Amino acid sequence: MEQEGAALDVRAADDGGRLGDELARIGYAGSVPCPAASAPHAYVELHIEQGPVLEDESTVIGVVTGVQGISWTELTVTGQSAHAGTTPMQLRRDPGYVAGEIITGVRALARAMGGTQVATVGLCNFQPNLVNVVPSSVTLTVDLRNTDEVLLQQAEAVFHELCTRLAADEGVTIERRTLARFEPVQFHPDMIGLVEATAERLGHSTRRMPSGAGHDAQMLARVCPTSMIFVPSVNGLSHNIAEYTLPEHIAAGADVLLQVVLARAS
């Protein structure tokens, strides 16, 4: 009950709304304690792919085998602010240069490892962010993902070594802060097989694939048999105002979801 009370007392960052009150307001409060006394029988989730693979291959249903491991790190690179015209290159402690090398380095890391390894720098802020000033500091984020935990740890080690070397070479400091870290999750083989067989029985083309993004399913997979169904995203777009999935693909995914749920319920 203590855990349930703590969960229901969580408040929104924007308007301060309390989760328990909002659930009651919309009629979603329910009567089952959270966490429940027993695990769910099964969990299956329908989602757009959020990527271009299904559309590129003209495949209707993605049979999701699991969720990639995710490692998010925020870096703050601190050097010495200086005038861009009067400070010789060899006397600079330039965090902007180091940030650029990190951006290039994590891309090279992903290319060298191949497979399912991906790496992204999604945020990069310069201070003081002026055209004629060597920056005093740069904050950037690095997103590493892999379907294999051992390989993800290897990528993290290479990334850590890159940062250590660059900091020493340029005379800057690099502070690291972990934003998120999730190990890869594999879905239950029976559930994967059920999704695949159901989609094929309904006449849809299928492809087994991991999820590159995090989903509720990765959390539920810890406690019950879990699977996911993907449908194509036009141009691979998601979290974007132009995000779109064809109505016939939404219907196909919903039909597979329904039949999987009925099969598990029986």
Image (cartoon, helix red, strand yellow):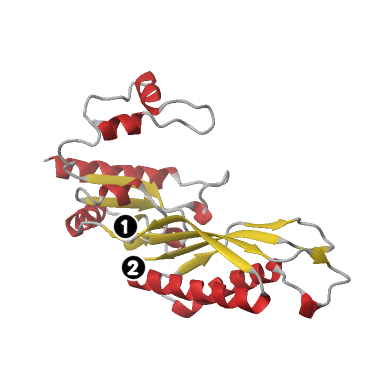
Q: Where is mark 1, residue-wise?
A: 64
Q: Is residue 136 left or right of residue 222?
A: right
Q: Is residue 147 left or right of residue 242?
A: left
Front residue of this view, candidates 196 and 177:
177
Q: What residue do we see at 53% from left, 56% from top?
A: 235
Whether 22 is drawn above or below 99: the answer is above
Front residue of this view, candidates 234 and 166:
166
Looking at the image, the residue that sits furthest to the top is 25
Rendering coords of residue 73 (x, y %): 50, 60
Quadrant of image for the N terminus: top left
Rendering coords of residue 136 (x, y %): 73, 61
SS class of the residue under badge 1?
strand
Whether 235 is drawn above or below 5: the answer is below
Instruction: Please state which amino acid type lies under the numbered disc 1.
Output: Val
Number of residues whose C-alpha sits closer than 10 Å to that of mark 1, classed few (under 14), some (14–19) or many (20 or more): many
Q: Is residue 263 left or right of residue 251?
A: left
Instruction: Please state which amino acid type lies under the numbered disc 2.
Output: Glu
Visible in this render: residue 173? yes
Front residue of this view, candidates 178 and 43:
178
Q: Are marks 1 and 2 in contact (CB under 8 Å)?
A: no
Q: Where is mark 2, residue-wise?
A: 149
SS class of the residue under badge 2?
helix
Front residue of this view, candidates 122 and 232:
122
Q: Nearer the viewer, mark 1 or mark 2?
A: 2
Quadrant of image for the C terminus: top left
